Image: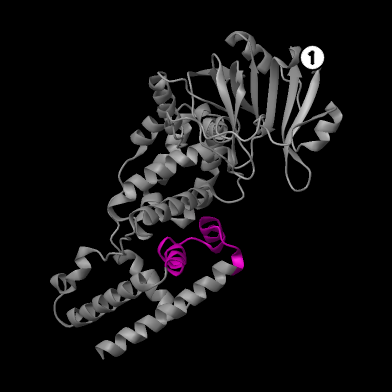
Amino acid sequence: MRVDQPEVALDDDEFVTRAQAGDLEAYELLVARHTASAYRTAVLLGAGSDAEDVIQEAFVKGYRKLSRYRRESSFRSWLLAIVANETRNLHRSRSRRDGLVLRAAAAEPGSEVTGDGAVGAVLAAERRALLVQALRRLPEKDREVIVCRFFLDLSEDETVTMLGWPRGTVKSRTSRALAKLRGLLDLQEVHRG
Amino acid sequence: MDDLERELRDLRAWLETPEAPDVTARVRAQLAASAPRRRRWRYYLAAGLVALLVALLPPGRAAVADAVAGLLRFAGVTIVTSPGPPPPSRTVSPLPSQRPAGLDEAQRAVRFPIRVPARLGPPEQVLVADPDGTGRYRVATLLYRGGALRVDAFDGHLDPVFVKRSSAAELVTVHGDFAAWVAGPHALTYVDRAGEVRVETARLAASTLIWQEAGVSYRLEGDLAKAEAIEIAESLG
């Protein structure tokens, strides 16, 4: 997917220009193109079942703010910044955050694997469950940066735009978040151990 | 990349993210309902209607006010309409520290360019009001017809300062952007920097047109017909 990005970015540019001139159809194309990553972002940042409303609102706001988009970053990361912001607003208003959820298949890892592979699969699934639990316990900002860097696969530049933090903060927050995560995992292992 | 980072990347494929819904139609509907230009409403409602001057309701016009309030909410600004009496006034003029100034002097005293409507020509008098700590003024007023016709201009980038109570306001356009036309007399309220509400009760304002251009909010007040007011607004130099 990342291989296609330069081409996609180029196309975006043209549609952005048209949308900025008031062309709603061009904006609809941008919406269609970025719905999947916007939705994934909202879900991974904890919007849960409200993710659909979040991205709808983000797209509407995106259109209204479009004149302020200066192409300093990709349209995608600019848009995802709005999605992230809307998700934060949601958390503020409902005082509940949906955590990361493992796919249902992951909960029954043994079901499709037999023999020696099954043991390894079970262990791997347990480890993933531990990781998700630890992630859920991270402070919001730490989790945000992990989601950007590892789950959304955003570059450092894109993460800077998306979270609106200085580059140095993105770097330091990433390593601090990883350290906290390690600490939480160690703690969990000890409890289980 | 260490093990934990690799594990996190691997985890990505195991995280539940449902199929993305198609929101295109809903986004389109919402945007079509508020035509592209209308987004600017927020600015003026925040800065124009809300910040400066406000029309107070004569009793019995509540229905119209509700329609306006609906519109304002639609535009993304929450505005309280209250049929109650205005807060007591402590000053005669609603604009604090208002004083006359020459046009050039006034220009130096405010942070935005003062533009004179070509239709009206040079003002008979210029006033500035509500200075901040550095001596910059917030409002500039051009007076015509012995003070019966006035153009107030104020920096539209100021934070919204207020509660608005509206009377019969109508949507019109100035240079293709939405503007508000308030026909008929209404009292005038201004919230100063300290948050104090100043209501002018001595002089009832005549009809008023409120619009915004280039980040500056304008208010034209006088005994004017709507078309005439719009012409004046569109002739800003």
Quarter of the image where one finds residue B51: top right
Which x, y percent locates residue B105? 85, 32
Which residue is located at x 59 percent, y 33 percent? B89
Q: Which residue is mark 1?
A: B121
Q: Nearer the viewer, residue A181 or B173?
A: B173
Residue B125 falls left or right of residue A1: right
Which x, y percent locates residue B225? 60, 8
Q: Which chain contains the residue that carries disc 1?
A: B
A81 is higher (above) or lower (below) than B192:
below
Which residue is located at x 43 percent, y 37 percent? A29
Quarter of the image where one finds residue B137: top right
Give the SS element for disc 1: loop
Which x, y percent locates residue A62? 48, 41
Image quadrant holding the C terminus of chain A, namely bottom left
Residue A156 falls left or right of residue B20: right
Quarter of the image where one finds residue B6: bottom left
B176 is higher (above) or lower (below) than A66:
above
A46 is higher (above) or lower (below) than B206:
below
Say if residue B118 shows up in the picture: no
Residue B106 falls left or right of residue B42: right
Give the magenta range: A140-168
Residue B143 shown in magenta: no
Residue A1 falls left or right of residue A116: right
Q: Nearer the viewer, residue B90 or B226?
A: B90
Residue A147 shown in magenta: yes
Say if residue B193 shows up in the picture: yes
The dominant secondary structure in magenta is helix
Which x, y percent locates residue B184? 54, 13
Which residue is located at x 38 percent, y 46 percent? A55
Callout 1 amino acid: Gly
Which residue is located at x 75 percent, y 19 percent? B143
